[in-house]
């Protein structure tokens, strides 16, 4: 394993999310880069879920314009009146850009999609409510090997998407468990 990759992974593993978010390391894709790490974030009460994949190729990849790539996914329930609002896509994308900016993460070569879905159930499932969801998928190339800022930005996006109230730096939420 690369010493550089091990150092970055140590940074990522040291991040402690707020108490409402369960952050776990999961198996990473093996064929996209020589080195990879994947994390999932689940907000309590199923308010949102996300996945963060860090890819590292010491030789770099042309499509990344560098040695590193962050690939993310966030899904959250949204209000039914928002699912038909075409401007909501730009708002949701701005959540990602703002979260990265506010965390101090510097990056280039960003791309992604925002998807709004409506799911209705029929026949034997007709008693279920209509589900409306938001999905934000994005990837970007970090400008430095300090991935902690990228992860903090992604976690801020998960928080925003779930409806959690942002907390100022250094402030912790109280646990609901007793």
Image (cartoon, rainbow, N blue to C red):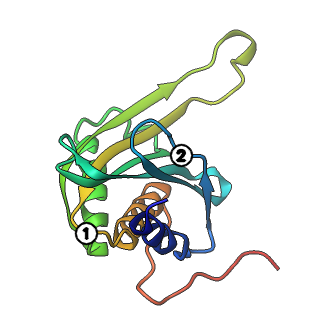
Q: Position of residue 119 (x, y in %)?
A: 53, 24
Q: Position of residue 168 (x, y in %)?
A: 41, 84
Residue 45 — which label?
Answer: none
Pointer 1: residues within 10 angstroms few (<14), some, or many (20+)? some
Q: Earlier in the sequence, mark 2 or mark 1?
A: 2
Q: Position of residue 11 (x, y in %)?
A: 46, 74
Label 2, on which residue?
Answer: 28
Residue projecting furthest to the bottom: 170
The residue at the point 36 percent across, 66 percent down is 153
Quarter holding the C terminus?
bottom right
Q: Is residue 70 left or right of residue 75?
A: left
Q: Quadrant of residue 87?
A: top left
Q: Quadrant of residue 101?
A: bottom left
Residue 144 — which label?
Answer: 1
Q: Nearer the viewer, residue 125 or 112?
A: 112
The residue at the point 36 percent across, 34 percent down is 115
Q: Position of residue 90 (x, y in %)?
A: 22, 46
Residue at disc 2, secondary structure: loop
Residue at disc 1, secondary structure: loop
Residue projecting furthest to the top: 123
Asked whether residue 165 appears in the rendered view, the answer is no
């Amino acid at each position: 394993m690369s010493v550089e990759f091990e150092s970055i992974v140590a940074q990522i593993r040291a991040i402690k999310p707020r108490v409402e978010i369960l952050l776990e390391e999961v198996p990473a894709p093996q064929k996209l880069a020589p080195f990879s790490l994947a994390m999932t974030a689940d907000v309590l009460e199923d308010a949102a879920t996300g996945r963060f994949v860090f890819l590292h190729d010491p030789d770099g990849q042309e499509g990344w314009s560098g040695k590193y790539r962050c690939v993310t996914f966030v899904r959250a329930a949204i209000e039914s009146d928002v699912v038909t609002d075409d401007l909501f896509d730009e708002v949701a994308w701005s959540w990602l850009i703002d979260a990265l900016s506010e965390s101090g993460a510097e990056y280039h070569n960003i791309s992604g999609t925002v998807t709004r879905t409506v799911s209705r159930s029929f026949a034997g499932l007709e008693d279920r409510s209509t589900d409306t969801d938001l999905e934000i998928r994005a990837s970007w190339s970090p400008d430095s090997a300090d991935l902690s800022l990228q992860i903090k930005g992604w976690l801020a996006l998960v928080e925003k998407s779930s409806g959690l109230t942002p907390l100022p730096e250094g402030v912790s939420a109280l646990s609901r468990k007793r």
